[in-house]
Amino acid sequence: MKETIKRMIGDFVQNYEKRPDVTARWGAPLIGFADANHPDILNLKNIIAPTHKLPSEILQGAKIVIAYFVPFTKELAFTNRHDGEIASPEWALAYEETNAMFRDLNEYLIGDLKDKGYDASITPEAYTFDRDKLISNWSQRHFARAAGLGTFGINNLLITKKGCCGRYGTVVTNLDVEPDAPVEAEYCIYKKNGRCGACFIRCPSGALTPQGYDRKKCYDVLRKNGERYTEYGSSYDATEGEGDTGGSEVCGKCVTNVPCAFIQYLK
């Protein structure tokens, strides 16, 4: 069943980019299956916020969180290689198109799983962002880490064996399969030996430093891009907090033109 789901996700992404109204292109997805009751998942209310949702709150009898990483292409990353606070228009559009694809992909997966006799769901929190606390109450990256897709880098993003230049999605289900284990190896070069730190240089806001991550500085740049790129809309639903720009709140500088963007890691 795991291989069937992996094939379904891969085929869906491949077919979706053939749509005439879609300009984005993606690489082959990575898919993992997290234990919905893994200690790292059950601890998310302590790690992120008490308001963070757990799989059991989304689906009664939840067993597995299907997590997938869809990489962007090197060609897209190249458009966003320049310095400065403003992302490329190609990057902003691809961000919105990818988020829109994930909604359709999740609906497709949930429908197929139900047809096969299982139950599946996704929380509305997956499509929202709290602009007051600057957090999501459904961290796709933390679920992906628990599913064995990668490890967190000093850039505050999850680095997979295919890099970190891409987007994550999830579906909660009662699917009865063997869960994958979190990765034990360290994928972040800086965390491994202190010899990188390229993301510190690339970050236009100064949000990334060896001392930590400043969410407010980061979001200030995202807002500037959101005010710039209103023509693509926003793929997030109505969110808590003031200041919704109505546009594409993106940046992506710390995942483009850096060593961990596309580097291939061994298991």
Image: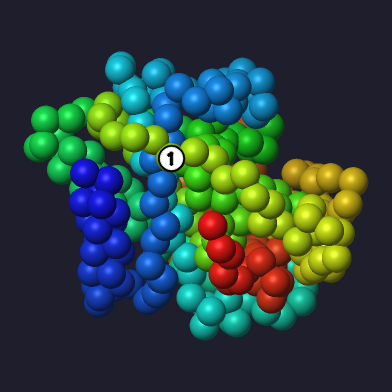
Camera-side residue: 131 or 136?
Answer: 136
Find residue 60 and report its horizontal and vertical position in percent.
30, 16
The residue where tag 1 is placed is: 180
**Where does residue 33 sit, x and y in percent of width and height?**
39, 40
Looking at this view, name the residue that lies furthest to the right: 211
**Residue 82 sits above or below residue 208 on the image:** below
Q: Nearer the viewer, residue 75 or 197?
A: 197
| Residue drawn at x 84%, y 45% as measured from the top left | 212
Type of amino acid at the residue the image marks with label 1:
Asp
Residue 185 visible, this angle: yes
Can residue 226 be seen in this snapshot? Answer: no
**Quadrant for the C terminus in the image:** bottom right
Q: Horizontally, is 22 left or right of 71 in the view?
A: left
**What is the quadrant of residue 111 in the picture?**
top left
- The front one of 211 and 245 is 211
Q: Position of residue 127 (x, y in %)?
A: 44, 41
- Residue nearer the viewer, 26 or 22: 26
Callout 1: SS: loop
